[in-house]
Amino acid sequence: MDLQLPLWFEIGSLVVLTLILIADLLIILKRPHIPSTRESTLWVVFYVTLALIFAVLMWVFAGGEYAGQFVAGWLTEYSLSIDNLFVFVLIMSQFSVPRRYQQEVLMVGIIIALVLRGLFILAGAAIIEQFSWVFYIFGAFLVWTAIRQAFPGGDHDDDVKQENFVVRTLRRFIDISDHYDGAKIRTVVGGKKMWTPMIIVFVSIGVTDLLFAIDSIPAIFGITQSAFIVFTANIFALMGLRQLYFLLGDLLDRLRYLHYGIAFILAFIGLKLVFHAMHVNELPFINGGEHIEWAPEISTWMSLGVIVVAMTVATVASLVASARDKRAAGVTDAAAAVADEKGTPPTVEPPADADR
């Protein structure tokens, strides 16, 4: 399904978005710093507002259906990008990246992600145009990814293991110093040129981006088959991700149920892809190569509703659970303080099955 958009709008949009990303990168290179909460908030609001303005322009030039596809795709990629931040936090912590230079690392990661996703989008669009049965594969893959996301000890742990393997391999072939030299990737130690640990961080970020691209591109193709919408939705999802990293901060640890919301979205889109594959079926060993007419076609607006509800429920449930734990910890600390003042041990309720 191709967009009926003026060519000048498509080209103009990509040029403007590229200029914004370049300006963002130049700001970081000129003044590396730790952004304040206010600065991060303003940038995130700016990028979200920009995405909504773009959606309105899509509505004006192409109609509500395509605008809805963009918003649904953008929200899906945005939620997956937030999940990506968890791994970025692990990488920054694992390699002790100075906080002042984390902005540059994140910006490099975003650029790598855009390049990788652009390649995946071009390949995916070409495959879909030639082979409609690929929707069966995309759908099954997303359902499998959803199951992996939903169970603890899965996604993020696997990503870190992959990175550790890459890092060990990298160290065998190149000389890497033990200390950072600002944001440089090359330095001189004892008169010898060496790579700094920053190169390991960039490689780890790149591996992470590759893994997430494999998950996210089939997901958005489940919402729209327009390469233009897919690419712009990815750009808008990644723009502001750097500021979001600093804005959320410790809040990321409190979003304990976020992976369930993402898993539900991926499973839903996976099933939607399978239904679409059935609807346009051409495989001779399924229904004799005929289309399966009774297979439901899930609308863009229903998809958008499911995505919004899933992320809202996961976020609210996470914050409620975190607040409950914080109150419980406060009560325990208060009881311990009172007991300490009285010189008596705090009363601890016995387990319910203590007398069994």
Image (spheres, helix red, strand yellow):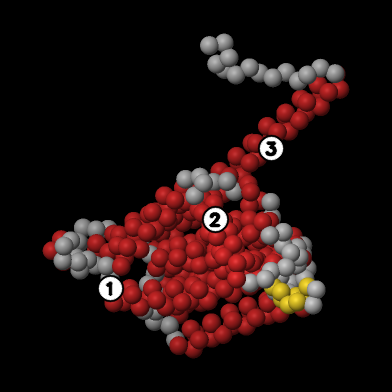
Instruction: Report, in whole angstroms, how far the alpha carbon at label 2 lies from the one at label 3.
Output: 31 Å
Q: Secondary structure at mark 2?
A: helix
The quarter of the image holding the N terminus is bottom left
Question: Is 26 on the left-hand or right-hand side of 223?
Answer: right
At which x and y percent is residue 297?
Answer: 30, 61
Where residue 131 is drawn, which disc sits there? Answer: 1
Circle 2 or circle 3, nearest the eye: 2
Q: Residue at x 24, y 64 (%)?
A: 279
Outermost residue to the bottom: 8
Q: How many marks?
A: 3
Question: Can you identify the residue that label 2 sits on?
Answer: 161
Return the residue nearer the eye: 270 or 187: 187
Contact flag, marks 3 and 1 (Cβ < 8 Å)? no
> On the image, which quarter does residue 128 sit in?
bottom left
Q: Residue at x 72, y 28 (%)?
A: 332
Residue 125, above or below 146: below
Earlier residue among tags 2 and 3: 2
Residue 273 visible in the current orientation: no
For label 2, count other residues whose C-alpha is less than 10 Å away and answer few (under 14), some (14-19) or many (20+). Answer: few
Q: Residue at x 54, y 74 (%)?
A: 114
Residue 335, above or below 322: above
Question: Is 292 on the left-hand or right-hand side of 300?
Answer: left
